[in-house]
Image (tube, rainbow, N blue to C red):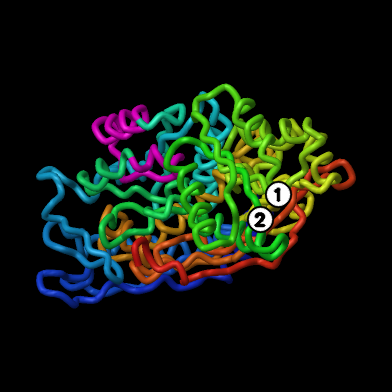
């Protein structure tokens, strides 16, 4: 099986794209990374079936990168422009700041993450395990130079205070290069001042909060998944197309920055006359259920139900709505609920009932779902299944492990690109590689990832409206729209 995986790597390596070059030297007192050293372009391969080129290419890459590291160390002072409109002010870093921290003498690259392994969002804890599974695969099959990828994951129960404590502890004791895949909008928002002050990469936040696309003001932080505001606008456009302007909407929102992004965007849809938001309910993220809130929304009789919530509350809303046959609205749900095995298998009969009675769950999905029969033969899903089979005892059907593999692929792409830059893998080069990332990843419906500083600050910008259906006894997503690709149109936050 491992030979087959390596064979797929070689095939997909041929799809690799070239990452953008170093930043410009415009602006007084601002220099690009390459100003005092030889310039270098960085290649990033397709992650849909791999995260690297063939083994021989990787060997050549390792040698050239090692030479580059010896020739040029990372900058530690001054303002360094790493991408368009994106400057690292290293003079504001701590006095003892070391750009090579987390890249150890014994050959480890140490990445930290904090995510819920307990509480109502515990299903997402499998993402961290999936990331480590993919790191194990890369370490075994095609390592980045001579390095071993190591993930340090801590449980925060989706409590922002615990996330802060985890991050502070890892910075103090775990010799971390940076963080990746921290889950939750309030959680990432709480740690951003800490990573910004410490000059530590905070990569690929697992939150669609629009403010993660703000490299001009927060160059150490980048998002990953589809912007929740973009997702909500897609809902609004579909509602207008299907029901006309002014359709009545009832909405459930998680009572935090995650849920309120949906709320504020829907209110904007109402302000311009697209919808009539007649009922809104907020729920506590730690609540045992949302029965009371759903009862209030049912009484509204709205034409559309929106669920801006996640994790355990996804199947709860499906079960509650299915048990009330008198109300069958158009039903939109956050794409954060799109793991069919984790969130819909427990309520498969309810989901089937809703679909047959005209209220099938709709989502604006941005990625392919491992475990969906529709993608059984898709090469990216075949690879994901192989990695899980060879490097773990879990499968796609066991939960969110496959999502962790996808997110880890992007981390690996970034680290490979940083490895190619003069000075090799360090915190400055990691951020330069991030904000100039150009790669293919066939796990995405849009197929590509492009970041270009303030010109294009969002990783995921394509989605498709899909309906949860049960076909021949299996849960699947059925497309009901074309892929809506807004790549490059989002710019950056505030612009």
Rendered residue at 62%/35% (across/down): 392
Rendered residue at 11%/55% (across/down): 91
Q: Main secondary structure of the magenta part?
A: helix
Residue 377 appears in the figure = yes
Of the numbered discs 1 and 2, the one sitting upstream in the chain is: 2
Residue 89 location in percent, x, y?
A: 17, 58
| Residue situated in front as seen by the camera: 122 or 72 | 122
What residue would you read off at disc 1?
303
How many residues crowd mark 1 within 10 Å: few (<14), some (14–19), many (20+)? Answer: some
Element carrying mark 2: strand
Q: Quadrant of residue 292?
A: top right
Asked if residue 420 lies left or right of residue 290, the reply is: left
Q: Quadrant of residue 108?
A: top left
Q: Are marks 1 and 2 in contact (CB under 8 Å)?
A: yes
Whether 167 is among the magenta residues is: yes
| Residue situated in front as seen by the camera: 248 or 32 | 248
Q: Which residues are magenta?
A: 161-189
């Amino acid at each position: 099986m491992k030979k087959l995986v390596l064979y797929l790597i070689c095939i997909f390596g041929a799809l690799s794209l070239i990452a953008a070059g170093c930043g410009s030297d415009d602006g007084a007192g601002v220099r690009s990374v390459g100003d005092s050293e030889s310039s270098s372009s960085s290649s990033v391969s397709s992650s849909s079936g791999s995260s690297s080129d063939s083994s021989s290419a990787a060997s050549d890459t390792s040698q050239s990168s090692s030479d580059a590291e010896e020739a040029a160390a990372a900058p530690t002072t001054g303002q360094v422009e790493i991408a368009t409109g994106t400057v690292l002010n290293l003079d504001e870093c701590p006095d003892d700041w070391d750009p090579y921290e987390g890249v150890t003498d014994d050959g480890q690259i140490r990445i930290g993450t904090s995510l819920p392994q307990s509480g109502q969002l515990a299903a997402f804890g499998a993402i961290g395990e999936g990331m480590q599974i993919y790191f194990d695969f890369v370490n075994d099959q095609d390592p980045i130079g001579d390095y071993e990828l190591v993930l340090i994951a801590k449980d925060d129960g989706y409590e922002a205070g615990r996330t802060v404590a985890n991050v502070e502890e890892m910075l103090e004791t775990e010799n971390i290069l940076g963080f990746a895949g921290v889950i939750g909008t309030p959680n990432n928002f709480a740690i951003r001042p800490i990573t910004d002050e410490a000059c530590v990469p905070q990569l690929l936040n697992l939150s669609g909060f629009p403010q993660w696309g703000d490299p001009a003001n927060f160059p150490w932080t980048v998002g990953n998944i589809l912007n929740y505001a973009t997702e909500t606008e897609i809902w609004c456009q579909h509602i207008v197309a299907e029901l006309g302007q002014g359709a009545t909407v009832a909405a459930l929102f998680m009572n935090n920055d995650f849920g309120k992004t949906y709320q504020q965007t829907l209110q904007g849809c109402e302000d311009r006359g697209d919808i009539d938001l007649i009922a809104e309910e907020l729920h506590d993220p730690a609540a045992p259920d949302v029965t009371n809130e759903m009862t209030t929304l049912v009484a509204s009789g709205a034409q559309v139900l929106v669920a801006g919530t996640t994790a355990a509350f996804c199947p709860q809303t499906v079960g509650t709505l299915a048990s009330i046959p008198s109300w069958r609205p158009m039903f939109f749900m956050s794409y954060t609920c799109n793991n069919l095995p984790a969130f819909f298998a427990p309520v498969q009969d309810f989901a089937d009932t809703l679909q047959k009675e005209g209220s099938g769950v709709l989502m604006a999905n941005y990625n392919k779902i491992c475990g969906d029969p529709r993608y059984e033969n898709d090469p990216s899903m075949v690879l994901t299944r192989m990695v899980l089979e060879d490097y773990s005892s879990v499968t796609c059907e066991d939960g969110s492990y496959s999502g962790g593999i996808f997110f880890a692929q992007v981390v690996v792409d970034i680290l490979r690109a940083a490895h190619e830059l003069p000075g090799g893998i360090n915190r400055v080069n990691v951020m330069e590689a991030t904000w100039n990332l150009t790669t293919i990843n066939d796990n995405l419906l849009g197929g590509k990832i492009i970041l270009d500083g303030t010109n294009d600050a969002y990783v995921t910008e394509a989605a498709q409206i899909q309906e949860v259906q049960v076909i021949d006894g299996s849960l699947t997503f059925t497309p009901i729209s074309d892929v809506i690709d807004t790549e490059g149109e989002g710019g950056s936050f505030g612009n």
